[in-house]
Amino acid sequence: MNKDLQNKSEELERSLAKQLDVFKKGSEDWLKVGAAVAVGAVLVYGVVQLAKKKQANQTDKAMQVLEKEGLLTPEIKERLTQKKSASLWSGLLEKLLFLGIGLAKDKLYTQFFAEPEKPVEKKENI
């Protein structure tokens, strides 16, 4: 009885160790995906900020030229300074978000529905 309990205990320890290894491998993959998403978000944010800064500089220059010429009216100033409602970046960010969600979903499906590996039992010839 004692030996049987000891064997079960060893088997449970091996099973737990294997589950921890699988969890570590899965978390490494998630960490890589998360890092890639974070780097992509930082890159997109930087590009958007640069584009905004460049556009603001061009608008300021245009307003200065119009003001020097005496052609700057409140209507023109409003048109030049009002925010744009849609842009390429908003659509791109949305597509990246859905791509990330799709990749995560595929990864989860493969992990949840994959059959667990069965240990190979060796037969002893006596």
Image (spheres, rainbow, N blue to C red):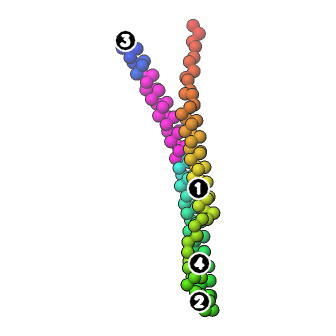
The residue identified by callout 4 is 79
Which segment did they paint magenta? 10-31
Which residue type does callout 3 highlight?
Answer: Met
Against 28, is 45 above or below?
below
Q: CA distance from mark 4 to mark 2?
A: 15 Å
Which image quadrant: the N terminus? top left
Against 18, is 29 above or below?
below
The residue identified by callout 1 is 94
Residue 12 located within the stretch drawn in magenta: yes
- In the displayed orientation, state which residue is furthest to the top: 126
Q: CA distance from mark 1 to mark 4?
A: 27 Å
Q: Position of residue 61 (x, y in %)?
A: 61, 83
- In the displayed orientation, state which residue is furthest to the left: 2
| Residue found at x 56% / y 47% | 101
Residue closer to the observer: 101 or 71: 71
Mark 1 is surrounded, within 10 Å at the Cα level, by few (under 14), some (14 to 19) or many (20 or more) other residues, namely few
Q: Is residue 30 visible?
A: yes
The residue identified by callout 3 is 1
Left or right of 98 in this view: 3: left
Q: Position of residue 21 (x, y in %)?
A: 50, 34
Which residue type does callout 2 highlight?
Answer: Glu
| Residue found at x 61% / y 92% | 70
Which residue type does callout 4 highlight?
Answer: Arg
The residue identified by callout 2 is 67
Mark 1 residue element? helix
Numbered label tally = 4
Which image quadrant: the C terminus? top right
